[in-house]
Image (tube, helix red, strand yellow):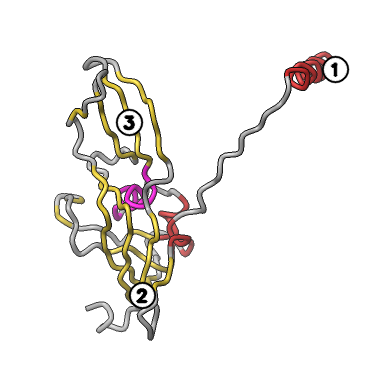
Amino acid sequence: VLRCLGIPTRVITNFNSAHDKNLNLSIDKYIDMSGKTLHLTEDSVWNFHVWNESWFIRRDLGSFYDGWQVLDATPQEKSKGIYQCGPASTRAIKEGDVNLDYDSPFVFAAVNADCVTWIRYSKKRKERIFSDTRKIGKFISTKAVGTNSRVDVTANYKYPEVKEISFKISYSQYKNSLMDDRKILVTAV
């Protein structure tokens, strides 16, 4: 319909798409002390999910948020009392602006939630034992214009994942760094 009105629109596919039911921006999994899964949340990860993007000028949010907007024609959750999703600015999603209207937190979680595993010791005590920050939002794609090729638009939704770098230093290097810190502290006093 939007294309018929002359509004640029395209289909987007998100692989490893999070469904963050409670909007805490994470997909939580609970286990007991023996490792058995406890069904305490309705969060889930779907193999993929598809939505539309349309190109809008956002006078309501400001020009910073102009451009591609997420519109989901098959929302699974109510937003403001009805089944709807969007238009959420892809710029807002990428920047983590989850306090905006139009389901920005839900779409942010769909492409960038952390998958967190908790051990539940009792109703009042739980402990986070694992967090996967890279699982969600893979190969976010659309179809190329004029061909059947895939175009990766992941960079429109999220910044590249940062690789962890481990630093190994000797004890003497560590000890010397402490001495340097003391010199700075003494100089400052």
Residue at 30 percent across and 62 percent down: it is 87
Tell me how many marks there are: 3
The answer to the question of whether label 1 and label 3 lie on touching residues, with beta carbons closer than 8 A, is: no
Using a 10 Å C-alpha cutoff, classify the residue at mark 3 as few (fewer than 14 neighbours), some (14 to 19) or many (20 or more): some
Q: Which mark is residue 150?
A: none
Place of residue 110 in the rendered image (x, y in percent of width and height, measured from the top left): 32, 51
**Residue 46 on the magenta segment:** no
The answer to which quarter of the image holds residue 60 is: bottom left
Relative image position of residue 148 (x, y in whole percent): 35, 80
Query: Gap between marks 3 and 2, in whole Å?
Result: 35 Å
Which mark's residue is nearer the viewer, 1 or 3? 3
Quarter of the figure with residue 157: bottom left
Q: Which segment did they paint magenta?
A: 102-113
Residue indicated by mark 2: 143
The amino acid type found where label 3 is placed reads Thr
Amino acid type, mark 1: Thr
